[in-house]
């Protein structure tokens, strides 16, 4: 037996409890939304992964008198499009910016954060999807994309289209006519006018007399008769060994030196800690505040960490999903059946 839509009871926190208002865009800040301010105005920006979500959010903003634009994200791939959704700066969003931004411009969840059907509807429209038959996922950030495969080290890049393929065989070499070799001219020898052929010239006599070193005083010296200064001397046969005074080193007491301990080896990071995702403390506090607001609304959810496919909150169980469906109201016409809680 299937339960009809008409059998649902109106909830005090559902979309029928109050009319739409600009501060309902706080539901976008529960996920990947960011709020900014300029002067006395504010603007909300978020990223969605489907085109139908842009149409739903545009219709929701028109109900609140806000102008919304949707443009493709510059880093999106063709097979997985993403869109940047942003509102125009409006004075109606200035209280929302003042509520979520501190004095330094850091986005922080307010301490009195509460949820209702209007806020949840915008969160579901921006980042809600089924995670199986008995679980519904509310994403806190866009779905992470798998990293691109790295090229293998041995693989060669494919040739570009502009490059011409190499010829299978080398082109035949054609002998070109060579220019005649040029020989260098022989040097010209200049001779004196008074020179006679085949006649040797007489060298002038040197005026420097031969140097007489005199008698050699080292002629009768034999180098092998001198004592060898590099010869090794045995310590016990050296007659001059006892002539040296005792230095007294042997009478000094022995001193034991303290052993210096070696420094402990540097502690290396464990393999499972390498590549751990670092999360900003303020962002983590915002996620905790959102989880507590879900519990207060009767929707306890399981937090999915970023390294496990999140960040997101998973609502498990048909009873809790039905509770979520009652709060967010009827699905919009453009929403696929597998994305809206029913």
Image: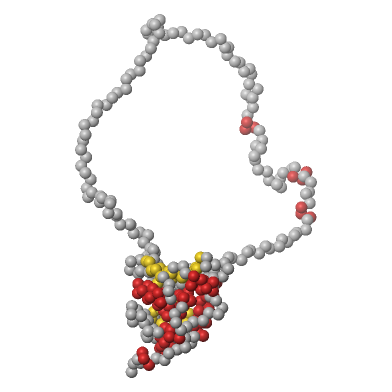
Compare residues 240 and 285 and report the one nearer the observer.
285
Is residue 194 shown left or right of residue 235?
left
Is residue 10 or residue 109 the one in the foreground? 10
Relative height, residue 205 to residue 24 (above, below): above
- Image x and y of residue 150, in percent: 38, 63
Residue 100 x %, y %: 53, 73
Placement of 6 over or under 289, stated as above or below: below
Identify the residue at the far bottom of this view.
1
Q: Which quadrant of the rendered structure holds the N terminus?
A: bottom left
Which of the 4 image quadrants contains residue 265? bottom right
Residue depicted at 52% across the width and 8% down the height:
205
Q: Where's residue 342, x and y in %?
A: 37, 86
In this view of the protein, can residue 316 be seen by the observer? Answer: no
Residue 289 on image: x %, y %: 53, 78
- Give the residue displayed 79% in from the left and 55% down from the top: 251
Residue 60 sits in quarter: bottom left
How did the renderer colour the structure? secondary structure
Q: Is 215 left or right of 79, judged from the image as shown?
A: right
């Amino acid at each position: 037996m299937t339960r009809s839509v008409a059998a649902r009871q109106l909830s005090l926190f559902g979309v029928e409890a109050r009319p739409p208002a600009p501060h309902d865009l706080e539901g976008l800040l529960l996920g990947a939304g960011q709020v900014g301010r300029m002067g006395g105005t504010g603007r909300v920006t978020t990223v969605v992964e489907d085109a139908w979500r842009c149409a739903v959010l545009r219709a929701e903003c028109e109900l609140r008198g806000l102008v919304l634009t949707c443009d493709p994200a510059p880093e999106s791939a063709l097979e997985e499009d993403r869109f940047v959704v942003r509102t125009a700066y409006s004075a109606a969003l200035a209280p929302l910016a003042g509520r979520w931004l501190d004095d330094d411009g850091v986005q922080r969840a307010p301490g009195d954060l509460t949820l209702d059907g209007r806020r949840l509807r915008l969160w579901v429209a921006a980042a809600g999807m089924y995670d199986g038959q008995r679980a519904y996922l509310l994403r806190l950030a866009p779905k992470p994309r798998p990293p691109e495969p790295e090229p293998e080290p041995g693989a060669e890049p494919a040739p570009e289209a502009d490059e011409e393929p190499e010829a299978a065989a080398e082109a035949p070499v054609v002998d070109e006519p060579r220019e005649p070799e040029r020989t260098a001219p022989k040097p010209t020898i200049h001779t004196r006018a008074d020179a006679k052929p085949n006649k040797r010239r007489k060298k002038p006599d040197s005026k420097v007399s031969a140097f007489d070193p005199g008698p050699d005083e080292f002629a009768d010296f034999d180098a092998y008769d001198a004592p060898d200064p590099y010869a090794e001397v045995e310590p016990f046969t050296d007659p001059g060994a006892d002539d040296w005074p005792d230095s007294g080193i042997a009478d000094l007491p022995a001193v034991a030196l303290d052993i210096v301990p070696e420094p402990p080896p540097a502690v290396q990071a464990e393999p499972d800690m390498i590549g751990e995702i670092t999360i900003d403390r303020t962002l983590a506090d915002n996620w905790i505040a959102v989880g507590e607001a879900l519990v207060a609304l009767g929707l306890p959810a399981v937090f999915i960490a970023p390294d496990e496919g999140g960040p997101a909150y998973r609502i498990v169980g048909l009873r809790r999903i039905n509770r979520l469906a009652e709060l967010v109201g009827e699905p919009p016409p453009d929403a696929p059946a597998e994305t809206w809680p029913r």
